[in-house]
Image (tube, rainbow, N blue to C red):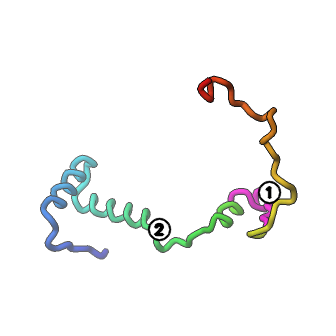
């Protein structure tokens, strides 16, 4: 089985690894291996990057029984947005404006 020797390790880092090993009831070798495994799992630099579209299709796509129709960029909505400027939509009161 391969081994790894780390030379010139900072004394404070060595002490922290030793303390973690003691707290986790492991040898320093086992603690260092666990730390390297965790770092390898957390390193997603080699993982393929998903776009928002890919994520949405994975979560909501045809495999889940939903087929999303994504409009092309720059396309205008099929109807005008509602106009809420009419007085019946005004919720401000005299106390809101300081009267």
Task: Classify mark 1: helix, strand or loop.
Answer: loop
Mark 2 = which residue? 44
Q: Residue at x 20, y 55 (%)?
A: 16
Relative image position of residue 75 (x, y in whole percent) = 79, 67
Tell me which label, 1 or 2, sits earlier in the chain: 2
Main secondary structure along the magenta-highlighted residues: loop
In the current view of this chain or complex, which residue is farthest to the bottom? 2
Along the line of sight, which residue is nearer the eye, 16 or 3? 16
Q: Residue at x 27, y 58 (%)?
A: 31
- Whether 95 is drawn above or below 78: the answer is above
Quadrant, the C terminus = top right
Along the line of sight, which residue is nearer the eye, 79 or 7? 79
Would residue 29 appear left or right of 46 to someone viewing this image?
left
On residue 82, the disc is: none
C-alpha separation, residue under disc 1 versus residue under disc 2: 29 Å
Would residue 55 appear left or right of 26 to someone viewing this image?
right
Tell whether position 69 is magenta: yes
Q: Residue at x 69, y 57 (%)?
A: 59
Segment colored magenta: 59-71
């Amino acid at each position: 089985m391969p081994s790894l020797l780390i030379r010139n390790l900072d004394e404070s880092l060595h002490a922290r690894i030793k303390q973690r090993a003691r707290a986790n009831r492991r040898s320093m070798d086992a603690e260092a291996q666990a730390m390297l495994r965790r770092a390898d799992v957390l390193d997603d630099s080699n993982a393929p990057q998903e776009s928002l579209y890919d994520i949405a299709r994975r979560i909501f796509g045809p495999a889940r029984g939903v087929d999303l129709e994504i409009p092309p960029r720059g396309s205008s909505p099929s109807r005008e947005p509602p106009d809420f400027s009419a007085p019946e939509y005004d919720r401000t009161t005299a106390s809101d404006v300081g009267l």
